Image (cartoon, helix red, strand yellow):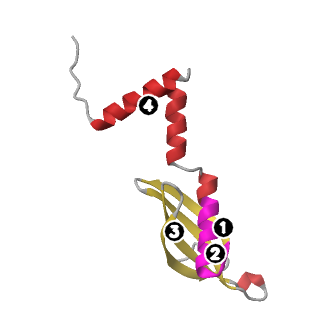
Amino acid sequence: MAQSRKTTKDDDHEEDTDRTSTDRGQDNDSSDSEESSTRRVSLAAVAEHARKRLASLTGRDPETVTSIEATDSGWVVMVEVVESRRIPDSTDILALYETELDEAGRMTGYRRVRRYPRGRGGDE
């Protein structure tokens, strides 16, 4: 039994995309992966962009990226930053920043979540 399907503008666009990739001799799977890769950037690129942008905004040195999470609107990246350098460095004050990036990897916001002495990151 044939199913009827309602066509929307998005469906028309998908059909055009499929036709274009088929005309080029590509299969639809490679077209889908290329399309998704242009919409979302790699984890490494997201991490690096978050580190660099946070450093330029805060004027502080990023220590490490502690987590990256994909969201519906982009990415949430947690970055550990050296807030205050001390001698010895085991007494440095670190901070954990939450950064938000859109799907293209552009930072849309950030906030400091907490501050703590180096070596005490897990303590609450």
**Camera-side residue: 105 or 82?**
105
Q: Secondary structure at mark 2?
A: helix
Q: CA distance from mark 1 to mark 4?
A: 40 Å
Q: CA distance from mark 3 to mark 2?
A: 12 Å
Measured as percent of width and height from the top left, residue 115 is found at 56, 82
Q: Secondary structure at mark 4?
A: helix
Indicate the quadrant where residue 83 lies. Answer: bottom right
Front position among marks 1 and 4: 4
Front position among marks 1 and 2: 2
For marks 1 and 3, the one nearer the N-term is 1
Q: Which mark is residue 17?
A: 4
Q: Is residue 51 magenta?
A: yes
Residue farthest toward the bottom in the current orientation of the protein: 87
Q: Amino acid at mark 4?
A: Thr
For marks 1 and 2, the one nearer the N-term is 2
**Residue that mark 1 sits on:** 64
Q: Which mark is residue 92?
A: none
Few, some or many residues within 10 Å of mark 4 (<14, 14–19, 20+): some
Front position among marks 2 and 4: 4
Measured as percent of width and height from the top left, residue 1 is found at 21, 10
Q: CA distance from mark 1 to mark 3?
A: 13 Å
Regarding residue 121, the answer to whether it shows in the image is no
Front position among marks 3 and 4: 4
For marks 3 and 4, the one nearer the N-term is 4
What span is colored magenta in the figure? 47-62
**Residue that mark 3 sits on:** 99
**Residue that mark 2 sits on:** 55
Task: Identify the residue shown where x is 23% and y is 25%.
Answer: 5
